[in-house]
Amino acid sequence: MNVSKLLRDSKLRVSNNTLNASSDVSLKTVDHLLRSLCSGHSDVSEEDSCSMKEVAQFVKEIAATHLNVRYILIAHICGLPHSLQLLFLEILPSILSISITASLIEEVVSQLKKMLENDNTLLLPIIGVMVDIPLPSHITSELAQLAENALSIVEEADLPLLFRTLIRSLGQ
């Protein structure tokens, strides 16, 4: 997969339509980019790893001005290559920090649970996302349970994240 070319084409498509201020073009471009990355390309070459960071940054920049990008990302995040899932988990709290609704939180948590079912190595990044977004009390208890279960399997360096999660859930 040539991630660099895909990203370059996406950036060009958005910049060519900046004068028209067409959010529809930006949304369709991000959707096309994520669909292309989901389409059975689970292996990412070494040369594509830098481009993956650029893809995450590109989506983050578009999301800053086009809030609907969040919905597109959430719809595709489970199908992305593992390395890109990790990158999007890192930026997800900042994308969700603006005007988040209860229904969006529910959808995000649902997708995160799906991701965890498919790949338990994502446990700590998913806990990290859930700590950083405003969760309703019924989900906070699920987060506490996740963190408690993770205590027995994580490395010592990851314990501060789990303790922070458990303490936060006690205050809810």
Image (cartoon, rainbow, N blue to C red):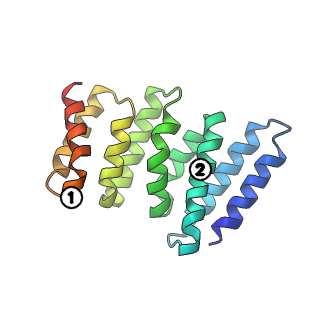
Can you say whether 138 is above or below 80 in the image? above
Residue nearer the viewer, 47 or 153: 47
**Secondary element at tag 2:** helix
Residue nearer the viewer, 137 or 53: 53
Can you say whether 164 is above or below 8 in the image? above
Residue 169 location, quadrant:
top left
What x and y, as percent, mark residue 13? Answer: 78, 52
What x and y, as percent, mark residue 152? Answer: 13, 55
What x and y, as percent, mark residue 93? Answer: 45, 39
Give the mark, 1 or 2, whose residue is nearer the N terminus.
Answer: 2
Q: Which labelled disc corresponds to residue 57?
A: 2
Asked whether residue 66 appears in the rendered view, the answer is no
The quarter of the rendered structure image containing the C terminus is top left
Q: Give the residue at mark 1.
A: 155
- The answer to whether residue 128 is left or right of residue 84 is left
Which residue lies at the image location 48% right of the left edge and 26% below the top edge?
101
State the separation of the CA atoms marked 1 and 2.
Answer: 29 Å
Asked whether residue 106 appears in the rendered view, the answer is yes
Which residue lies at the image location 60% right of the left edge and 56% below the top edge?
55
